[in-house]
Image (cartoon, rainbow, N blue to C red):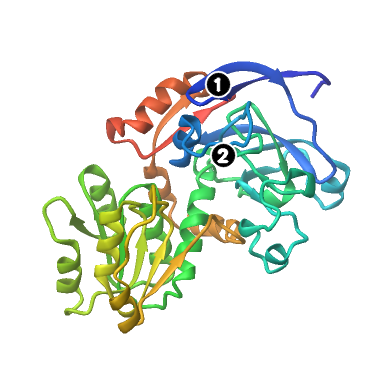
Amino acid sequence: MEKNEMMHAVRLNAPHDLEYCSIPVPTPGDMEVVCKVESVAICGTDPHIINGDFPNFWPDKFPLIPGHEWAGVVETLGDSAKALGWKVGDRVCGISHVGCGHCAMCMEGRYTLCDNYGHEEFGHRQYGHYSQGAYAQYMRTNVKAIAKIPDEMDFNVASCMDPLSIALHMVLRSRIEPGDDVLVNGSGGQGLMAILCARALGAGKIMVSGSGFRLDVAKDFGAIPINYRNENVPERVKALTNGKGAKRVFECAGTAVGIQQAIDSVAKGGVVSVVSLPGGDIPLPMRRIVLEEIEIIGNRANPNTLEKAIPLATQFEREMKRLITHELPLSQYEKAFDIFNGRKDNSLKVIMKPQL
């Protein structure tokens, strides 16, 4: 790669102001690599960042290159990255979070809760949120935010390792045990990936609430479909579990009604593991939560689950490929977002290809 080389990127200059532009290729720092981005997926958080729904937070300043679900090939390396064994040509996938590595949360391995969040001067990064991301031909990243992928893994599938590892974190945090009946509340990409994680960990009955095409995909993935538009979700769950409810519920819907349904569907002594982020605080049935010892667990991103998600994905190659419904060049980002935001053409994961 020649010095002062330029690359194409999609840059957010202000809320609602995306620009396909030419900018310099980044240079890696000591613990960093620069990768050629082969595939980058649109995350459900991306439209909110682009629309300015998190002012002065995601991002804290402009311009920003969004994007954090990506895969590609290492092109250049910093000295310490090279000393750690990373090489030009390594096929990798990435996640968004890098902790500072020094605070109490990072020392516990909970780096997505880093006490120095937002302070790049202390080493924290969240790519595509307030740190520069992957809607570009090249991506600079700390080696702590990447993992090697198998030679046979498709780059499109590899770009989905970030959300798959988030789903895995949510499922693991529920303390699921083999044979547990579970409800996946919501049949979007995160919910569909939660089905695969629950299957891999030995769940009993896997029930999924949703509607339309996505519910058909959930059924194909091995789940019992529950159409929330014409069925009472808690009643249906209890009918399928001898009146007990689901021992583990994975909340991926993100609406007040959906979260209430999730809690109403859980069994006594059960766990509701939440990955969705509702628009505001919602009331909870605290009397039942206390008297029936129901646990509500929040989950932020994917600490220490990326490398676990990669072999899991290889077990479900057919299902992972079915999640990818659209592929477009990065230059057609407007069309890609129109498809994703409008859920057009039965879209699930919409992939953009920066090298096309």
Tell me: residue 45, above or below residue 197.
above
Give the structural element (helix, strand or loop) at label 2.
loop
Q: Nearer the viewer, residue 45 or 219?
A: 45
Whether 118 is drawn above or below 66: the answer is below
Q: Which residue is mark 2?
A: 58
Tell me where residue 74 sits by quadrant: top right
Q: Amino acid at mark 2?
A: Trp
Q: How dense is the environment of label 1, judged by Cα within 10 Å: few (below 14), some, or many (20 and up)?
A: few
Q: Residue at x 23, y 48 (%)?
A: 216
Which disc number belongs to residue 275? none
- Please say if the residues under marks 1 and 2 sit with CB atoms less than 8 Å apart: no
Residue 114: in sight, yes or no? yes
Examine the rendered structure and indicate whether residue 128 appears above or below residue 303: above
Residue 264 percent across, percent down from the top left? 24, 69
Q: Residues within 10 Å of mark 2 (few under 14, many from 20)?
A: many
Q: Is residue 237 left or right of residue 24?
A: left
Camera sees residue 314: no
Say which amino acid is labelled 1: Leu
Quadrant of the image occupied by residue 107: bottom right
Q: Residue at x 63, y 28 (%)?
A: 62
**Residue 222 or 13: which is nearer the viewer?**
13
State the residue at coordinates (58%, 41%): 57
What residue did someone put label 1 on?
356
Q: Classify residue 262 as left or right of residue 302.
A: left
Work out which quarter of the rendered image holds the C terminus and state it: top right
Q: Nearer the viewer, mark 1 or mark 2?
A: 2
